[in-house]
Image: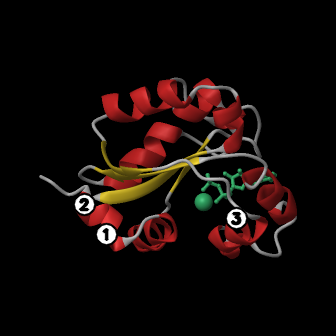
Amino acid sequence: MSNRTLAIIKPDAVKKNIIGQIITKITEAGFKIKAIKMVRLTKDSAGGFYEVHKGRPFYDELVSFMSSGPCVPIALEKENAVADFRKLIGATDPAKAEEGTIRKLFASSLGENAIHGSDSDENAAIEIAHFFSRKELLENYSS
Ligand code: IDP
Ligand code: MG
């Protein structure tokens, strides 16, 4: 069991100016922020991040959306981080997400769904490395 996951506050939520509200939900649920930044992804970087979805019908739309404005990747730490964070964000489609989940509260649509969460420990490690250098993570490891 790993204790880390990668969240991304997606461009729709950044545009809505609700970064703070989403981070409050995350930290109230017991996650610690180990590293955070705001970045504007290029199409190449967004395409690389979502490489597993290449060939799916929504891939081009997803890459365009994720590179349409700034987003906020966050490396998070908590016991059972991956599974607990998926539970906190809710189903991919906000219409199907449970009450109180971040997507239920803040997502606009299936595509523009406010937040990303890693789906496995293996992918969490890969995704954190996509955004944060070892140095950035280590410098934030004071405890
Ligand atoms: P997840 O984010 O809940 O893990 P995935 O199936 O991994 O969901 O899909 C990645 C992202 O691609 C979703 O969060 C959403 O932004 C987008 N997406 C997934 N399915 C669709 C779709 O059918 N239409 C448009 N966008 C989609
Ligand atoms: Mg996924």
Residue at screen point 67% across, 53% down:
40
Question: Which residue position holds label 1?
Answer: 135
Pinpoint residue 130: horizontal percent, then vertical percent. 52, 70
How far is the residue under mark 2 from the one under mark 1?
Answer: 6 Å
Question: Which residue position holds label 3?
Answer: 46
Residue at screen point 48% across, 49% down:
37
Q: State yes or no: discs 2 and 1 in contact (Cβ < 8 Å).
A: yes
Label 3 secondary element? helix
Left-right relation of 76 to 86: left
Q: Which comes sooner in the sequence, label 3 or label 1? A: 3
How far is the residue under mark 2 from the one under mark 3?
Answer: 26 Å
Question: Which residue position holds label 2?
Answer: 139
Q: Quadrant of residue 105?
A: top right
Pinpoint residue 25: horizontal percent, then vertical percent. 42, 28
Q: State yes or no: discs 2 and 3 in contact (Cβ < 8 Å).
A: no
Structural crowding at the residue carrying mark 2, measured as other residues with C-alpha within 10 Å and reported as few (<14), some (14–19) or many (≥20): few
Left-right relation of 33 to 130: left
| Residue situated in front as seen by the camera: 142 or 52 | 142
Structural crowding at the residue carrying mark 1, measured as other residues with C-alpha within 10 Å and reported as few (<14), some (14–19) or many (≥20): few
